[in-house]
Amino acid sequence: MYMLHEAQWVRRVDRRLEAPAAAADLHGLTIVQLSDFHVGFRPSFNLRALRKAVALALAARPDLVLISGDFACGPHGSAELQHLLRRLADAAALGVFAVLGNHDHGDSKAPFVMPTDPRLIEACGVRLLDNETASVTVGAATVQIGGVDDTDGGHDDLPPVLAALDRRPGVLRILLTHHAEVVLQAAPGDFHVTLAGDTHGGQICLPLPGRRILLSDLSATFAEGAYDVGGRQLYVTRGVGTSMLPLRAFCRPEIVVFHVEAGAPAAAGAAGAPA
C-alpha cells in the first residue's frame, strides 16, 4: 500500500539555474520541468499524480514550462491530459515547450503501448520541438530552447539544433530531451543546461549503504538529479508517472522548479551553470 501512496506523493524540487553571463532581464525567471506522465498506462494512478504535479507547477507561477516526453501510453485519460496541458499553457506567459519520448512513439517494454498523437498535444497550446529550436523574449533578453526527439527509436537529430543555436552573449540556451545521453553529443558552452527524463529516477529503488539501486534502469549512466558532464550541466528528473508497475519506492515523483540567476549585461561573456 505504501508504494501505491508514494507513486502519487509528488514533490516539488527547487533549484538555482546560475547563468551569470545571461542578460539581466532573465534574472528571476521561473522555469518548471515536467516529464513522464504516462497517462493511459493501466493499472496506475498516473492521472491523479499528474493532477497534483500540475497543481504544484501552477503554484510556482511559471514563466516557462518544459516537458521532457512520455505524455501517454494509450488513449485512456486523454481528455483530462489535454485539459491539464491547457491549464499549463494558460498559466505560462512564455509558453509550454516539449519533446516526445519513446512511449509517445509506441516504443516500450511495457505491453499495449500506443503512440501519442502529437496533434492532441499541440492542440492544447504546447509547442512540440522535433529536432529544432524555439526562442522566446523577456524584455530585451532571449531564451532559446533546443528540443531533440526520442533516441530509442532513432528519431533524434541534434546537429540541426546545434546549427540553429543563437550564440550571442546574453542568450540563455536550454536543451530539452527525453534521454539524458544526448548531452554527450553537445560541447561545453552549447547550452546552459540540459533537461531530461525517462528513468523515473529508478521508480523502485533499493537503498543500500552508500548507494541506491535503481530498478527501472540498472545500467543508466545518468539516473536522476544534477550532473556536471565535463562542463555540461544536466538535470534528470524522476518525472511524474509510473510504468510497468503502478508503484514507487524511495523515489517520489517530482516537478522541478528552476530559478534563473542572471544579471550580466547583454555584452557579457560565457554562460554559467545550474547549482
Image (cartoon, rainbow, N blue to C red):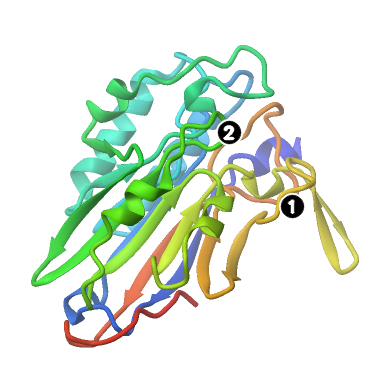
Q: Residue at x 23, y 42 (%)?
A: 89
User: Considering only vertical position in the picture, is 227 above or below 238?
Assistant: below
Is residue 129 shown to the viewer in this render?
Answer: yes
Q: How far across and how far down the image is residue 12, in percent?
A: 49, 58
Q: Residue at x 53, y 75 (%)?
A: 231
Between circles 1 and 2, the one closer to the viewer is: 2
Q: How far across and how far down the image is residue 152, in percent?
A: 58, 33
Residue 79 disc label: none
Q: Residue at x 48, y 43 (%)?
A: 35
* CA neighbours of label 2 inside 10 A, class few (<14), some (14 to 19), many (20+): some
* CA neighbours of label 1 inside 10 A, class few (<14), some (14 to 19), many (20+): some
Q: Give the residue at the far right of this rendering.
A: 209
- Say which quarter of the image contains residue 131: top left
Q: Which residue is mark 2?
A: 152
Q: Which residue is mark 1?
A: 250
- Callout count: 2
Q: Earlier in the sequence, mark 1 or mark 2?
A: 2
Secondary structure state at the residue bearing disc 2: loop
- Say which quarter of the image contains residue 120: top left
Q: Is residue 194 left or right of residue 32?
A: right
